[in-house]
Amino acid sequence: MPVENKKAYVVAVDMGYGHQRAAYPLADLAEGGIINANIYPGIPKADEKRWQAGQGLYETISRLKNLPFVGERIFKMMDYFQRVENFYPARDLSKPTLQLQQIYKMIRSGWGRDLINRLNKNPLPLISTFFTPAYFAEEHGYKGDIYLVICDADCSRAWAPLHANKSRIKFLIPNRRVKERLELYGVRPSNIFITGFPLPKENIGGRDLKILRQSVAHRVSHLDPEGKYQKKFKNTLSEFLGKVFTNKKHDGKEPLTITFAVGGAGAQKDLGVTILKSLKNHIKNGTIRLNLVAGVRQDVYRFYQEAIKELNLENFYNNQVNIIFAENKMAYFAKFNAILLDTDILWTKPSELSFYAGLGLPIIIAPPVGSQEVFNKAWLKSIGAGVEQQDPNYTAEWLFDWLESGWLAQAAMSGFLNAPRNGAYHIEDIVLKGTPSEIEDIHLL
């Protein structure tokens, strides 16, 4: 009989948004709240400095990427060392990279031992949303089970342990491609569970998808103003959305809501202003509402405030144009998830937010930043839930062509049907209840 646990340790890292965003939906499982392995109270100074060195370098180079000539070259050099290799031809990829060997060298010199010693006083199951804390646990003799959540649609060699075929770490992964990839890295199939990415429970409404179905039905009518998609796929909509699907054209009384999300390094904030300029007249006449997501970055918040002022849109602030900002990441995630309930289109680089297509959100794909995001983009396009942005200077032209065709409604339903959305519940079943729980067979990729 599997032993049920009421709680687990949920461990993330405070770097960018992705790893904490993956941890946020698991907060109700977290003993003592979510632990950030790089900034927890009492962390040794030596450990803190090791974390800071890597984080500072990545964020600096991410922002430099936009500089002409030099920035792109510097970023490519960094990205090369953490790249995801081409999957084909299938081959043995178990040999550790230099990056992974260096990580283990630091761990064996004591990095992370303090955290694991603290958790070993009451060894509950440990769920990590970044690979390094999982390696801490295994190398420093953690007494509980160790789980690692993978946050991208494919993963580099760094996401599998040094000697993957001997590791006891269990992997909670978003899709089938990651399973195949981990097996090439040498991970035993019995340690791999395809759960889907953990999406926010407040946007789903339980395992019966009560809130999610209502959201998607409302969104489809907004995204299909001519009713073309709804007419063609009426039976599909009725089957998967049930009684909440009403098969009606959007009456135009509510604005179409677009949410543009900047990543943790703030590297694409200029794109948000370009979108704002193009849609200025539509914002003024009430047909478009634009949410500009600054996250926890005050510099991005001020940048967007200034842009709104320069474009004479101050009278429309906090109504037709909004800046989403919070002082800390947990508060930001709560605000972000709340606005998604009324968002019709999510515009973002293909980060971990790619998996939010599972909430029935059509995604306009901004340029990827890094090797893993190239693979996320390919996954989004393969399931039909995302399309690359056209020239953002002309958003007001191509966006409305897409709406008229019904394509965006189709993308919303493709994400809802083809992207797993119950990851948080599957993870809870596996970690706390000891019961197998994987994505449904209908999710093919």
Image (cartoon, rainbow, N blue to C red):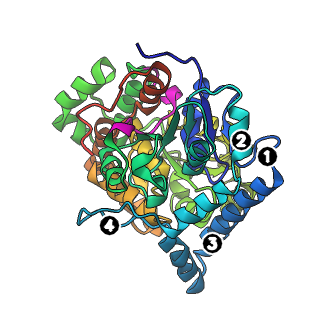
Please, what is the three-letter code of the amino acid marked with disc 2?
A: Leu
Q: Secondary structure at mark 4?
A: loop
Instruction: Give 366 or 128, whichever is nearer the viewer.
Output: 128
User: CA–CA distance between discs 1 and 3?
Assistant: 26 Å
Please, what is the three-letter code of the amino acid marked with disc 1?
A: Ile
- At label 4, counting other C-alpha atoms closer than 10 Å, the crowd grade (few under 14, some 14-19, many 20 or more) is few
Please, what is the three-letter code of the amino acid marked with disc 4?
A: Asn
For marks 2 and 3, the one nearer the N-term is: 3
Q: Is residue 239 visible?
A: yes
State whether residue 338 is above or below residue 153: above
State whether residue 63 is above or below residue 404: below
Circle 3 sits on which residue? 61
Residue 259 location, x and y as percent? Answer: 52, 48
User: CA–CA distance between discs 1 and 2?
Assistant: 7 Å
- At label 2, counting other C-alpha atoms closer than 10 Å, the crowd grade (few under 14, some 14-19, many 20 or more) is many
Residue 182 location, x and y as percent? Answer: 36, 51
For marks 1 and 2, the one nearer the N-term is: 1
For discs 2 and 4, the disc positioned in front in the rendered view: 2
